[in-house]
Amino acid sequence: MTKSHRSGVQVISTLFVLFVFSLFFISCAPAPTPSPLANEITFYDWEGDMPQSVLDMFIAETGVRVNYLVYESQEEAIEKMRAGQIYDVVVMESRFIPQLVRESLLAELDQGNLLNSKNLSANFRDLAYDPNNRYSVPYNWGTTGLVVRTDLVEEPVIRWADLWNPLYQGRVGLWMGQQREVISLTLKSLGYSANSDDPAELEAALKRLLELKPHVLVLEDFDLYTSAGVLDSGRIVMAMGYASDVLTGMELNSSISYVLPEDGALLWNDTFVIPANSQNKVTAELFLNFLMRADINARIVNENGYATPNEAAYPFIEPDLLNNLMIFPLNDDLVKTELILPLSPEGQKLYDEIWGRFTTAP
């Protein structure tokens, strides 16, 4: 064997010994310590949106308590976040995600802690408002239409424009906590896009809303959660609303029905987000992963009556709900609907100005 060959063998032997020693030290090194879970997380959502039974199951399985706080509007929630209030998980409409990201109010999610995201339909992942779902987890979706007491109207209610029918002055309701949707449905009643940021079209919408204002009732004055009770009483004969209003309402009165307006229903979808100032991000992600579990997600649908993007949950959803076209409408019924989209900063200022002029008008 030549000297060069012996040197090569020695080098290889030395490298082999170093490799073995490195494996030894790696195997002996302590495993990374998982981040400790928080004793409690704060969850910020609509009144009655998340079933208490689901929160109780999370507490039983993890020992982590959930402090459930409620807001009356998305704008209220955003203002609280901007003011530095601390929440660990917030339910937020998808249209607000780009704005919150621009303002650095959201934490980027660790997908390694969200393995149950595999249960979500591809139709709800990697969408334009949040590429790669870096900041949000899809929660539920649905339509905004008209909830009607069919026995108390003199002719079929089929359009948003029917809210302005003089026959029903003082007996129609709006959710005033839904600023964007109220403006958007008014735009639709005029034949415009629900997402228009044209100043002239928004001025026309304001004029139309001011015509309605003296004759409209604020649904939050009756119930923060549902219009079912006030519709059952007959005090209101029609209102903007959701499938959940009808599901609750039909238990009280079989004449309460849901209409997708011919001038175009609105489409919405809610997401879960973790605010950037949360000190319990790992525990919050554990909570989100729990909520995406198929059986847990189905329990939410079975109790709150909203459609879910979680396809793995479908086998666990009650058939009456899964087959209910108010909750899971057919594609043909969605042709005229329009998804509420994020606005540009300039567009948002216009909407805020229009809403301010509407709410402060006598």
Image: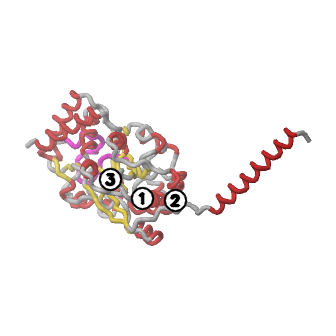
Q: Secondary structure at mark 2?
A: helix
For label 3, the residue is 257
Q: Position of residue 163 (x, y in %)?
A: 22, 43
For the residues bearing labels 3 and 1, Cβ distance under 8 angstroms: no
As helix, strand or loop, the secondary structure at mark 1 comes to helix
Q: Position of residue 221 (x, y in %)?
A: 18, 57
The 10 Å Cα crowd at callout 2, few under 14, some 14 to 19, many 20 or more, is many
Question: What residue lies at 28% left-to-right and 44% top-to-bottom?
Answer: 157
Is residue 302 or residue 342 the one in the foreground? 342
Q: Which residue is mark 1?
A: 284
Q: Earlier in the sequence, mark 3 or mark 1?
A: 3
Task: Give the residue at mark 2.
Answer: 294
As for residue 53 lying within the magenta part, the answer is: no
Q: Quadrant of the N terminus?
A: top right
* Type of amino acid at the residue the image marks with label 2: Ala
Does the rendering let one see residue 116? Answer: yes
